[in-house]
């Protein structure tokens, strides 16, 4: 509520009209909105149940109070906020044709979506680093990833997301909107709103591209380096089970980054991509990872616990 009031104040200073936006949902597929809502609602329910289950289990089991599970809880909270920022409004569009969204609420949704997407990317990097240390340097894991270090990493991930995305609502609220207040989308994605402005939007566009390519690009690089080292160690294992779990984690990361980068670049350069396909992809990268993360990480966490025992002989 406080964030909404803050963005309302900003919009009062810099923005006079329109007071609301209209979200169309998925353009061209309006007749199928009710049917599309079924998988959307199913994914949301699975995400809510899965992530709350992880939080409950880790909280009630003292033996799980270690860095790996702390990062997993942080990821679960991020996924809950990210999915809850978009699905309720999307379902209200599909079920009740409730398409209006207040300007300040639109800015708030935009901020939460992109902020927690960047935070989730940062958590992936932290988890990849944790797995790298646990598998490749198991004897030093407890001395490298101490509780203060984990707290500092988590704080840095949160501050990075919050500060990098903060210019988005300020830039959007400072633009005049004289074309239309109709957003052909299910949510207030940054570029979907920027494209409605009737002034020069190069700064907003370039800054958004900077966040996507530089921030997410660097995260992909660090994750790739970590998993290359992990895979080199994993391939020395005599069984295929550990390998499959690592590949499953990589698949989760790929689905998040590929769909995020695709969605961002499509707004700028994909003029021939069907609009309904672009909107669906944008929803995929926001809904599928929160649903899959509890399943994938819930099944692969025993890898981190067995890794020290597996590689202790090599280290000694």
Image (cartoon, grey):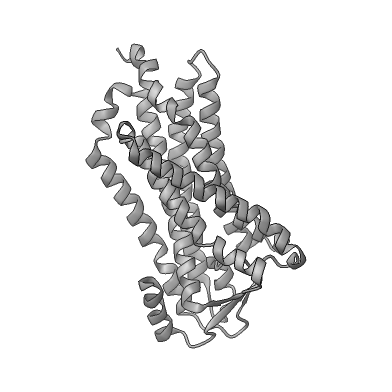
Write down the quadrant of residue 63 in the picture. Answer: top left
What x and y, as percent, mark residue 80? 46, 53
| Residue toward you, 196 or 27 | 27
Write down the quadrant of residue 254 in the picture. Answer: top right
Give the position of the C terminus as an image quadrant: top left
In screen coordinates, is 149 left or right of 78? left
- Say which residue appears at 26% left-offset and 46% top-offset: 152
Q: As displayed, is residue 91 above or below residue 76?
A: below
Residue extending farthest to the front is 60
What x and y, as percent, mark residue 211? 46, 57
Q: As displayed, is residue 281 above or below residue 175?
A: above
Can residue 273 be seen here? The reply is: no
| Residue toward you, 76 or 153 | 76
Q: As displayed, is residue 136 above or below residue 312?
A: below
Residue extending farthest to the bottom is 16
Give the position of the N terminus as an image quadrant: bottom left
- Say which residue appears at 66% left-offset and 73% top-offset: 97
- Say which residue appears at 50% left-offset and 64% top-offset: 206
In screen coordinates, is 308 left or right of 98? left
- Say which residue appears at 55% left-offset and 68% top-offset: 188
| Residue toward you, 195 or 300 | 300
Can residue 35 be seen here? The reply is: yes
What x and y, as percent, mark residue 42? 62, 51
Q: How many marks?
A: 0
What x and y, as percent, mark residue 163? 35, 61
């Amino acid at each position: 509520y406080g964030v909404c009031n803050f963005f309302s104040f900003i919009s009062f200073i810099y923005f006079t009209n329109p007071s609301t936006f209209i979200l169309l949902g998925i353009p061209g597929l309006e007749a199928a909105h009710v049917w599309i809502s079924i998988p959307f609602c199913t994914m949301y329910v699975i995400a809510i149940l899965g992530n709350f289950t992880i939080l409950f289990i880790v909280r009630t089991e003292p033996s799980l109070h270690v860095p790996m599970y702390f990062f997993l809880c942080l990821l679960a909270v991020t996924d809950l906020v990210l999915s809850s920022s978009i699905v309720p409004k999307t379902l209200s569009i599909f079920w009740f044709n409730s398409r209006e969204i207040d300007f300040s609420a639109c800015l708030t949704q935009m901020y939460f979506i992109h902020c927690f997407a960047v935070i989730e990317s940062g958590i992936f990097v932290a988890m990849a680093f944790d797995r790298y240390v646990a598998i490749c340097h198991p004897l030093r894991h407890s001395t490298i990833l101490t509780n203060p270090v984990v707290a500092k990493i988590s704080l840095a991930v949160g501050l990075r997301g919050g500060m990098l995305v903060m210019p988005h609502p300020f830039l959007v609220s400072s633009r005049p909107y004289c074309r239309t207040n109709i957003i052909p989308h299910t949510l207030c994605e940054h570029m979907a709103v920027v494209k409605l402005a009737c002034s020069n939007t190069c700064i907003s566009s370039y800054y958004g591209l900077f966040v996507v390519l530089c921030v997410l690009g660097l995260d992909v690089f660090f994750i790739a380096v970590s998993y290359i080292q992990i895979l080199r160690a994993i391939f020395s294992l005599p069984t295929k089970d550990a390998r499959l779990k690592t590949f499953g984690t990589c698949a989760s990361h790929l689905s998040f980054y590929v769909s995020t980068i695709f969605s961002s670049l499509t707004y700028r350069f994909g003029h021939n991509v069907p609009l309904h396909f672009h909107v669906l992809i944008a929803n995929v990268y926001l809904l599928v990872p929160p649903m899959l993360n509890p399943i994938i990480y819930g099944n692969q966490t025993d890898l981190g616990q067995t890794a020290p025992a597996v590689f202790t002989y090599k280290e000694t």
